[in-house]
Amino acid sequence: MERRTFLKHVAHSLAIPGFLGSFSTTGFGRTLDNLLRLANDTDRALVLIYLEGGNDGLNTVIPLGNYGALTNVRPHVVMQESQLLEIPDTDFAFHPALSDLKSLYEEGRLQVIHSVGYPQQNFSHFRSMDIWMSGSDADQIVNSGWTGRYLEGKHPEFPEEYPNEAYPDPLAIEIGLGASMLFQGEKIGFSMVLNNVNSFYELLENEVDEAPEGPVGDKIRYIRLMAQQSQKYGRIVKDAAERITYQRPYPDNRLANQLKIVSRLIAGGLRTPLYLVRMGGFDTHDNQVEDSDRTLGRHANLLQTVNDSIMAFMKDLEYQGTADRVMGMTFSEFGRRIVSNSSLGTDHGSAAPMFIFGNMSEGKYLGNSPTIRGNEVYNDNLPLQFDFRQIYTSILSQWFDPTARVSMSANQNKTFEQVPVIKNALNATDNPKEELRIKIFPNPVQDFFTLEMDIQPGPVKVEIVDMSGRSSGKIFEGAESSYSFKRIFDISPYPPGRFVLVVSNGNKRYSEQLIKL
């Protein structure tokens, strides 16, 4: 969590004499519950990468079990088997442009989920995009997004009571031309929209795009300026971005530029849980490949951009120290047909693979590599193995909130079976008090206290969270080989106040009240 130093958080609040007497026991109990929730729920981020146009999954993750059959039905686009990046101990390979993603897969930091889609596939870009964004059935018209409904359930008083002390940051950020359905609740939208990468840097520089001279230009400049000023979270985002003065290098492309902003904001202390970035161009009806070399062409260029951008993002997250709390997911509105067309391209299809990436990714693969018979005709499509809402439910439940599974569908009576996507996933049945014995003594504490607890062997981190739910300092981080932990800590530099001691053990977190006299 190390976002800010302790004094930046509390010098103007917790050091006030009489602070301890300002809370009733009942009032602090409610505040403590809120802080415990914040300490567990607001530190993680999910970055959704939308591949606009319908990515050709069979040219991204290539099935090798029936490669001869694949060459029969895809003669215009199929690559030579020797050119593919074969994944050991599997029956599939990556496109040659995805060498870095292959490395992430082999490191256990990228998961391949085969043949994801939905029943009764709609082949319209706009309609299928709405289905993926809303989480609806194919025959449902829903005007809210799956993440929008999730946020609405957790924040019913938005936007009137936001930003506030508990949730000072935007609840969602997207970069693109206007707000998407994704973060739209049934009553209100939840995202802060950066219309493009330039608008983010204009926010930092307090500048607006150039406009023509004259009365029309003056009106345009005024509208743009007012739009900036009316952005409720603009100052907060700017403050977060300005804390980061160096990032690892990124390639100069649209997707990488968006991911660079996301990494900067997360590293700068923004606790926004959800981000959406976009990359277009995947509607490859023609010239998907170069006939002289099928590893080249439009689709290869697109996948190279995805590969380079995600790897740069991951390296930057590692450099910034945020990699363990960020997950990424790719999705597209559909895949492409099994049978290629005569224009060196592919037409709208159904199921396609998804990638889940990050240090906490379950890794490996789910499902079976698609089976190709070799006698498919134009209208044939890949059979569905996973409903996309299974993936949504799984990542929300396992990464953010174990109770989130019911918020996935617009039909609240419909649930979707989870699949493993997160290492040591959150579990709704976890009972921290039963699983972990924590003892702090003395408490209240003057200068020194002893922390004694039961742990599971592995990484342990201990930090102090202030009354706004922000980390005030990490006081221990290391790997433990035993099942018990006992340390003495000096918190004499901290001013008097009430805090929460947050213990991270693997992917589980536990919290206890701590009072400094």
Image (cartoon, grey):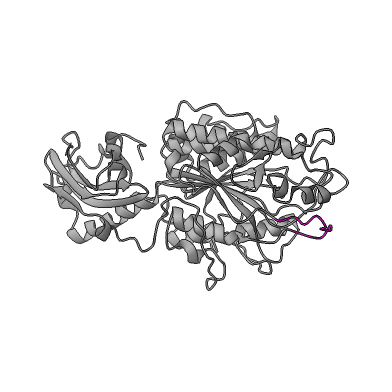
Q: Is residue 308 visible?
A: yes
Residues rendered magenta in the picture: 371-381
Left or right: residue 25 versus residue 166 is: left
Q: Main secondary structure of the magenta part?
A: loop
Q: Nearer the viewer, residue 127 or 173?
A: 127
Q: Which quarter shows the N terminus?
A: top left
Quarter of the figure that contains the C terminus: top left
Rendered location of residue 498, percent (x, y): 21, 47
- Where residue 228 sits in the image (x, y, percent)? 54, 40
Left or right for 303, reference 444: right
Magenta region includes residue 113: no
Locate residue 380 relative to residue 437 in the image: left or right: right
Residue found 68% across the figure and 36% down from its top: 96
Q: Is residue 200 visible?
A: no
Image-quadrant location for residue 391 = bottom right
Q: Nearer the viewer, residue 229 or 257?
A: 257
Q: Give the residue displayed 81% in from the left and 53% down from the top.
A: 339
Tell which residue pokes out farthest to the bottom in this image.
413
For residue 479, above or below residue 436 = above
Counting every numbered tag in the picture gives: 0
Give the percent coordinates (x, y) of residue 473.
28, 37
Frontmost residue, 162 versus 412 = 412
Q: Is residue 379 magenta?
A: yes
The residue furthest right is: 342
Q: Position of residue 481 (x, y in %)?
A: 27, 42
Residue at x-position 77% and y-position 40%? 79
